[in-house]
Structures are given as C-alpha cells and as structure tokens.
Amino acid sequence: MPIADLKGHDRLLVKPGHSIPADGILFSERTSIDESALTGEPLPVSKRLGDTLIGGTLNIEQPIEMEVTRTAKHSRMSSILNLLDRAQAEKPKVAFIADKVASYFVAAVLITAIAVSVYWWQVSPEQALWVTLSVLVVTCPCALSLATPTALTAAIGSMRKIGLLVTRGHVLESLANVNAVYFDKTGTLTTGQLSLKETIAVNNTSIDELRSLAAAIESRSEHPIANAFTPYFSFSAEHSTNYVGQGIEGSIGQRTFRIGKPDFAMEISGLQPPSLPKEAGICLLLADQEGALGWFIIDDQLRPEAQRAIQQIQQLGLQVGMLTGDQATNAQRIAQNLGIDRFEANLSPEDKLARVKSLQREGEQILMIGDGINDIPVLSGAQTSIAMNGATDLAKTSSDVVLTNSNLQRIPEAIMLARKTRNIIRQNIGWALLYNLIALPFAAAGFIPPWMAAIGMSLSSLIVVGNALRLNSH
C-alpha cells in the first residue's frame, strides 16, 4: 500500500533489507537498524521490544513487526524536508553584473547615437547617416553580453570533464567566493563501508586461518560488519546464531566459535578476555571453547585521496571543518588523521543547519560536502554545496553540484577553476568596456567608417570568446 495511506496504530511487517516506512515502535523482540543515512553513525543500532523506529532507516537482521506512531506528514523525515524547504527559500540569489551593465550600456549607446545624429545633421547632413551607423555598429554590446555566458559555459564544460555536474546557475560565482569548506564524515571523507583494518593473533593460529574462520561464521549474517570479511570467505559455518548487539556464534565441524564483543566471545570458554589492542577502530574477538584466538580491527576507511584533498584546500587559504552525526571519538580520530582542526560531532540535521547559519552570520562563505539524508538541510542552507556520487537521491537534488566520480581532489580543482572563471569574466567585461570607450569617440568624430566598425566589433567579440575558451584548457 502507498506510504501516504498509513495511519497511526497501523501494524506493519518490515522484512530484512527494507526501509522503515514511518516513525513507530518495535513490536518484535529485537533487530538491528541502520541509521547511518540519518545520523552518520556507521554501525547499526540494536533495537528491542518497545524501542522507537525512525522512518527512512533500514531494517537489517530479521523480519519485524512495528506499529505506526506518526504518519509521513508528521514524521522525522517530514521535519527534515521542512528544513530543506526553508533552507532553499533563504538561499542567496546571485545576479550576474554583466547583464545589468549591458542593459544600461544599450540605453546609453542609443542616447549617444541620437545625440551624434543630431549634431552631424546640423554640421554635415550628408555624413550624418554613416557616422551614426558607425557609432551603432562599433558600440554593439556583443562583447559585453558575451563576456559572462561564454566564460560560464566553458567553465561548466571543464567541470563536467573533471567529474563535477553543476545543477545551479550561481555555482561558479559563489564557489569562487568561498572561504570555508565543511565536510560530512561517513560516506564523504570515509568510504562508508566497513573493512578489516588489522588481524592480531592471540595464540599460534595463523592470520589466514583466523580470517577464514571469521569469514565462515560471518557469512550467514546480514550485519554490515560481515561485509568486512567477504574478501576472506572460502567456506561457510554449518550453523550460526546472531546475538543482537553482541556478536555471532557458529559451529565448524566439532568446534564452536564466537566472534563479537570480548565478553560475549569468551563466555563459551569461561575465561577472561585478553587486553584490548591499542589500534583505533571496532575491536572484535574470535574465540572457541579453548579460549581467545585473535582480534579483528574493523574500521570505516578514509578515502585514499582525502588527506591530499584537504591539504590542497588549505593551501588555497580556506578553512576546513567537519560536521558529523557520528560519535565524538570517531570524529576526533578522523579529524586528527586528516589535519582538520574544526570539527563537531553528534549533530542532528537541525544542528548542522544551525551551525552553518551561525557561521554565515559571522561572515563565512561556506562550501558544504555531504551525502546522507541528515545532510539535506545543510546542503541547501550553505552558499554552495556538493553531493557525493553515492549520496541519496534527495541529497543530490538538494545540492548545487554532484561529484560524479567521488574523487575529493576534484573539489580544490573546482575552486581554482571557479576563481579562474571569475578573473576571466572580469577581464572580458573590462576589455569590452575599454574597447567601447576608446572606439566610441573616434566613431562619433567620423574617423571610423561602417565597414571598419563592423570589423572592430567582430574582433572584440572574438577576443572575448577566445579568452573564455582558455578555461577549456584547465
């Protein structure tokens, strides 16, 4: 049935891998919910009977029954969309100066032509027509009108070539003026996919065997952590049981294994867990009836180009910050690895938008990069915004630019291209005005015949177009 037809107190069945269609309460014993698109937290959240569920999140482990408490119109997702509408309404409107200058210039040229015609009609009537014609031709505002659109067209084409799809007309001008760049964390600075960072043996078991055993036990799980062991899968466990929020128990031959939290894994042996490794990340312990076998460090990996991209942005003289809904410890670790001094964690969509609005009131021109549902309001509220290629559809439509290849190094390239475009537009406008200011007095004095005026006007336009085409060589 359509989601719009759901009503309060409706009972729903939600299968594994399906999204929660509305805000509600869990009526099953337990499950795990992926709330990363809404909160930025990469790990699923354990839910038990009576816990609240948020519409738009993803059910992971098993079929569940839920009761609707708030319909789509009043749901958490609806409040985020309301923030989106408000942010878009407040978005600054950037007008191109060249269009206004050209309109005033045309009026000035017509007035000048009338004055020149009246003067020559009184002084030398037989020359009045061609002198007036020369004035009109030599001052035709073609170059002035072409100054901005040719540069913008060339620049947008260049941005498309490097993997940036521009969806708003103001992007190049506002991008050239940014003085601060803020990133979301999960799915933006990181890949958004958990992977095995390190394996540490506790006894004499080999690293390869530890990985194969863990992959076999995790092979029957739908949990995102299981994806980290996929590259090491060679056989499957005979039986497995998932304990929500704790780990997995599986049997291979005559041996029973547990992988997950240290205390949970060590229950089958009755021994105390070994000391936690010092490495940062999610620590999982593999154990059997004899004791601990090995540690697995799981982490959401940084994009390989992220550090270099941050350095390039900072070299452009811009502030770099991070706004994330993830936990403070994870955010701090990522920020330290990337050299980001300004970061805030545990932020809701409303908090992100409020923070950006506060920075804007302090004079910052902000470029925001994100990918999730929780980034939608702030993507619309920032002066300029970029959505990652893997972003939600709503995040893409709310942003000004889509990064089609997800390479963060394209962002500093885009900023440099926008700055170059701004300079070329200024050069084009300056040349067009200078040409007209020089040519007009000579044409009005009768020194430039119409054929020469036509050549001058054409050359002026060609110079403007040629200057704009330099952007294609970026």
Image (cartoon, rainbow, N blue to C red):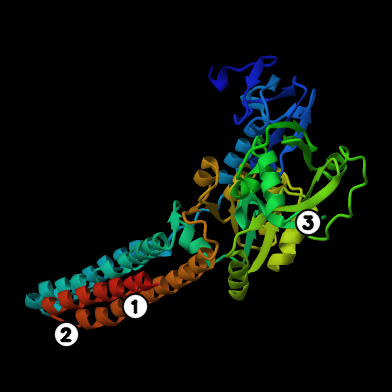
- Image quadrant of residue 50? top right
SS label for mark 3: strand
| Residue that mark 1 sits on | 431
Q: Is residue 462 left or right of residue 365?
A: left
Asked whether the residues under the numbered discs 2 and 1 touch, taking CB atoms below 8 Å apart as contact, a structural biologist would say no
Give coordinates of residue 250: x percent, y percent.
74, 35
Give, as a three-letter code, the residue at label 1: Trp
The tag earlier along the polypeptide, 2 or 3, is: 3
| Mark closer to the observer (2, 3) | 3
Give coordinates of residue 343: x percent, y percent.
74, 59
The tag earlier along the polypeptide, 3 or 1, is: 3
Instruction: Please say whether residue 260 is visible from this viewpoint.
Output: yes
The tag earlier along the polypeptide, 2 or 1, is: 1
Numbered disc total: 3
Give, as a three-letter code, the residue at label 3: Ala
| Mark closer to the observer (3, 1) | 3
Q: Is residue 435 left or right of residue 89?
A: left
| Residue that mark 3 sits on | 201
